[in-house]
Image: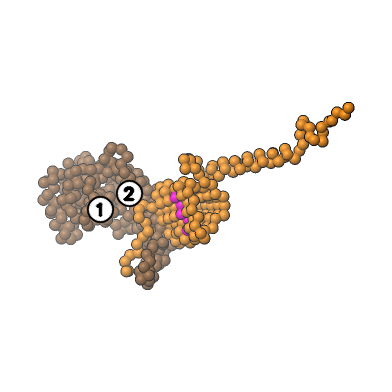
Amino acid sequence: MYYYILEQPKSMLEKSLQKQFRDIVGFFGIAGEITQESPARNVDELVKIALDKEYNTIVVMGSDKLINKVASLICNKNITLGIIPVNASPIIEEIFSLPNNKIEIACQALKQRYLKIVDLAYLYPSCYFLTSAIIKSSHPLDISLQVDDFKTQIKMTELKITSAAINTLPTKNNDDIEQSDNRLHLFFTNSQDQPGNWQKAFNWAAGKKTLDKISSAFRARKIIIESVAPIPVYLDNQIIDKTPVMFVNKPRALKIIKSRAKILEK
Amino acid sequence: MFEKTPTTSTGPQSIVGANVNLTGVLKDANDITIYGSIEGEVTCQSNVNIEEKASVKGPISAKIVTVSGTVDGSILAETKLEITPSGKVSGSIATKDLIIKSGAQFNGKSIMLKFDAKIESPQKDIFIDEQAKTDKKSTLKTEKDNKKKEPSSNLPTNNQINYEVE
């Protein structure tokens, strides 16, 4: 049986999607205990109740924030995470192979129960996440990066660290459990050094492609970010920490239910 | 026309941006594209592209290496090494397929690897083995030269043949 945690709806669309879910969940044969996040009971308490009742699968219906929160609470335990994405980010869509706001497709995936073990990104001291942590600024910031075996000093306006769950290697054995490449994704750029609109227009008129030579991308197991002044790090539009910070990849930290079919429409 | 600048990355490859200077070892199983500068080693199991105005000071090891910038160090390209007209390489190179285009600059030693050779050891060993071979050849050559210069005491020379006079 599944334990469902529904996010507090913020719009009429989310309310109608939750109503649709309650109506059809029994039809797919995946009925279970349905709970909702509320001021009286927050997510931590709901997950604790599920663990006490020994549910082995928790399904989250909501956005990145709730998905990351529940993933952080149940990782490294023998509990499977399923989702019904509602206004979630493209990263979540890609990891779970589920389109946003499509209840029937998500319920079908939960019924098929195709499992995948994914890595999680870990921000010391206690924050796991599936999506991306972001450092953003309107003006260039001086940052020192230590990435696995190399170091660099950079000026950046945007820096993003994405979990390794987004990349998977082909299955090496006959199991239905896919594996990731065990590396976080690091991306940073300085928008002030990017070619301006006039340069892009000139290139377009001259028939040249405007290549992005300013952005950098790496994959690493460990990333340390330091700066002179503390800079806030955002996850799901909330500040989770300030520099200096260390991100690490936690391999095979979470078991999830993903869809077998790829997303064909957005 | 004013859309977001398209990125050059088409997969999970590593890209060193134009204003980025790395110090240390850069390793990746996928492609590495360098627009900035690296002081240290670059190790890749796929392709390494050093673009124009990029520079690498240190050894590079990959399957296919394309140099359009500056490399100051040894290059080991298992399959192919291409130095484009804007490329400059100072250091030893070892590869199976070498392309140096007109305008490229290359100062160093070149070793052509055999097609059936499997490279298991780091590039240093290849260069050390080759250096040992050339050293051995040079020592043999000097020995031969020395032998020619010094007359042998055992064998009689024309001047030492004793004619019996009756």
Q: Is residue A6 above or below residue B86?
A: above
Is A159 magenta? The answer is: no
What chain does mark 2 sit on?
A: A
The amino acid on which the numbered mark 2 sits, given as a three-letter code, is Asn
Total labels: the figure holds: 2
Q: Residue furthest front?
A: B166
Identify the hue of chain B.
orange
Magenta region, mostly helix, strand or loop? strand
| Residue positioned 37% across, 64% down in the render | A209
Residue nearest the viewer, comparing A67 with A213: A213
Q: Which chain is brown?
A: A
Residue B89, how many percent across, how many down? 53, 55
Magenta segment: B64-69
Q: Is residue B60 visible?
A: no
The amino acid on which the numbered mark 1 sits, given as a three-letter code, is Glu
Which quadrant of the figure has residue A257? top left
Is residue A178 left or right of A139 when viewed as pictured? Answer: left
Say which element carries label 1. Answer: helix
- CA neighbours of label 1 inside 10 A, class few (<14), some (14 to 19), many (20+): many
Marks 1 and 2, the one that precedes in the sequence: 1
Instruction: Give the labeled residue for mark 1.
Output: A93
